[in-house]
Each structure stands twice: as C-alpha cells, then as structure tokens.
Image: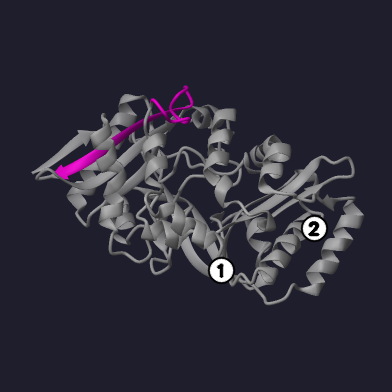
Amino acid sequence: MYKIVEVNNHNLLKKFVNFPVTLYEENPYYVPELTSEEMKNLNPKKSVYLKTNLNQCKCFLCLKDDVVVARACGIISNVHNEKTNSKRIRLSRFDTIEDFEAAKMVIEAVENWGKSMGMDTIHGPLDFNDLGREGMLVEGFDHLSTFETQYNLPYYSQFLEKLGYQKEVDWLECLIPVPHEPDKRNERLAEIVKKRSKLHEVEIKSVNWLIKNYYDEIFDLIDETYGTLYGTIPFTPEIRKSLVSQFKLILDKDFVCLIADENGKLAGFGFALPNIARAVQRSKGRLFPLGWARILHSLNNVEVVDMALIGVLPQYQDTGATSIIFNSILKNMCKRKIKVAETNVQLEENFKSIKLFDPYNPKHKCRRRSYVKSLDGKEIKFHNAMTNTTT
C-alpha cells in the first residue's frame, strides 16, 4: 500500500535526507550530500534559504508498507520567478527505487503543491541556487560523481519522460588530464594578455586573507557574470556567509587565482576545489566520528581537483584574460602533481566556456538535464539557457 507523507517534523526530515544514502549504499558512483548541511538547509527554522521570502519549500516521502521508497522536494524561488516573470516550481531532491508508481505519486505531490501555490510550470532537478546540485544524470552513469553533483540511475529520466517531462537544458562535464609540466605557450600567452590588458595576478597570502579581502568582490562578480544563465539567482549576504562557511575548510590557495586591473579592482577569478568525493562517500555524508578525518586526509593527498567556478568581467571576456587564470592554477596543479581536473557543470550552449578547455584535451564525462512540464495544460514557455528568458 502506497502512502504520501508531507515532511513536517525532524524525524521525517531525517528519513528524507537519509533515503538516497540508503538507496545507493552499494553504488560505487554515488556521493552523498553532507547530512548536517542538508538537515539545516531544509529546516525552515535554520535554513538561510527559507528564513526570508526568498523561497518556499515542501518535501514529500512516498511510503510502501511504511518503508520509504521515493522522495521529492518542491522549491518555489520567488526571486527567480520575479526575475524571469514566470510562475515556476523547482523539482528538487528526487530519488526513487525502480518503481514507477512510487515515482509518479511523489512527483504528483510536488506538482499538486505547486499548482495550489499558483505555479503553472515545473522544472528541474534544481536546488535553491546555482551552486547547489542541479540536473538529472542522463549520460555517464559509470563515473564517480563529484561532491558538488548528484548521481542517479537511468530509470529516473525514463520515469520523468513517461510523466510528460521534456528537456529544457543540458549541462556537460569533462575530465581534463593534467600534464606533468606547465605549457610554455600558455605562460607566454598569459604574460602577453597581462601587458595588453593591464591586468595582474593578486598574490593570495592565505585562504583567510582571501576571504577577508575579496569576499564580497568575488560574490559580486559571480552575480554579474553568471546572472543571465539558466536558473541563477543573486546571493544574499546570509547565503554568501553560509556558502563560505561550508567551503572554507576545503579551499586551497594554490587552486585559486584572482586577477585585478591597474587600479586593483577585481577583474576576474577562478578556483578549483580538492576532490573530496571518496572521503564523503566512505563516511556516508556524516562528518562525525570519522568524516572530518577522512576529508582532511584527502585534502593532504590531492590527486583530483574539481574546476568549480571561473568568472571574468564582460569587458575582459574576449581579451584572453581567462588564460591568466588557467595558467596560474594549472602551474600549481603540475607542482602538486594533480592527475585530473574535472570541470563543473557547463551549459551545452555556453560555447565560450566549453571552448576554454579545448587546449587541454578534455574527455566527455557526463551529461545532466533539467526537465520542464506544464502544470496548467498550456504551451510551455521554455527558458533560454544563456539569457534565462522565455522563448
């Protein structure tokens, strides 16, 4: 007997958060979220995403004979809907056993809540913002996920398509083999661009120094350079603080590059994160009692890095400024004997961003998809991936 339960207390939230960890316990490619962070992010009393009118959220479980068999979450991003003049609900945190009826019931629960809130369209999987896990895996099921990305089995997308969901955008991920030595041509190009554009690298003394001196400038630049892309919203001061506290301990100054103009104003940035996927996987998303020890061990023995973000002000985007950033980070990867760099999710229509990696012989790893479905029976107004406007 199937039953839908709305998550409205601590015990149900704990079941909601732990379900995919149990579901994928024997899967070698799944990397869980940090349980403590998920519990906080989905708790209206503690979440920086739910304390204000930024978002509304509702989580549902599907039980079969009192055992959890599926879960899904609906997020209404008021900021994004105002920005795009739309009435959309985000499908988030969808996981299910291979049981179409269970998947159908839990997704319909999200859809019905969305309709009751006046929404006319559902899309996703998406998180509260662009730095969360987004996109359903549709290619690359035999690759280990990064800490920043979600894993799912092939039947997920089959279930969604059977329920009438259509592709809206895709993201791509690539693997970049790191050479043993820096490419001298890249170094020469970086120096030429520095002189021509009057840019220079900022000497980063420590992670704490970086946060103290460039915290707001980096987030301002993220908002400016990523603001037009699919699903993005600006970061509030509270969200900025939360993200910094979450990632501060795994930031490594060797894998960060800032470039500034002749007046010292930040013109661009790029950073990669040490890959902690195996450590988090072994700890099943729990930091205690051994999770932190495993993460710290992986930070001291880095072989793989995740290319997290890169952003350059519009006036420098066609000047080759990104070559300065890549050259700086790549030199330190070679110095630290990093074997592989994994790109973050990149919109398949973001040709400029994808082309940046061409000189490094990237290898395709994964494809992720955001689906869309009408809730009111009317024609879907698709969002453009690069401008976030309807077409």
Residue 342 sits above or below residue 225 on the image: below
Q: Which residue type carries mark 2? A: Gly
**Crowdedness near tag 1: few (<14), some (14–19) or many (≥20) residues, C-alpha within 10 Å:** some
Residue range highlighted in magenta: 45-63
Q: Position of residue 34 (x, y in %)?
A: 41, 47
Q: Which secondary structure lies at badge 1?
A: loop
Nearest to N terminus: mark 1 or mark 2: 1
Mark 1 lies on residue: 303
Mark 2 lies on residue: 320
- The part of the image, by quadrant, that contains residue 106 is top left
Quadrant holding the N terminus: top left
**Crowdedness near tag 2: few (<14), some (14–19) or many (≥20) residues, C-alpha within 10 Å:** some
**Residue beneath the point at 47% across and 22% down:** 52
Q: Is residue 120 left or right of residue 336?
A: left
Q: Which residue type carries mark 1? A: Glu
**Residue beneath the point at 48% across and 56% down:** 295
Residue closer to the observer: 65 or 32: 32
Q: Position of residue 82 (x, y in %)?
A: 53, 26
Q: Is residue 187 left or right of residue 212?
A: right
Residue 256 sits above or below residue 175 on the image: above
Can residue 391 be seen? Answer: no
Q: Give the foreground label among 1 and 2.
A: 1
Q: Which secondary structure lies at badge 2?
A: loop
Gap in angstroms between the C-alphas marked 1 and 2: 28 Å
**Residue beneath the point at 18% across and 37% down:** 4
**Residue beneath the point at 51% across and 62% down:** 298
Say if the magenta span includes residue 266: no
Q: Position of residue 265 (x, y in %)?
A: 82, 40
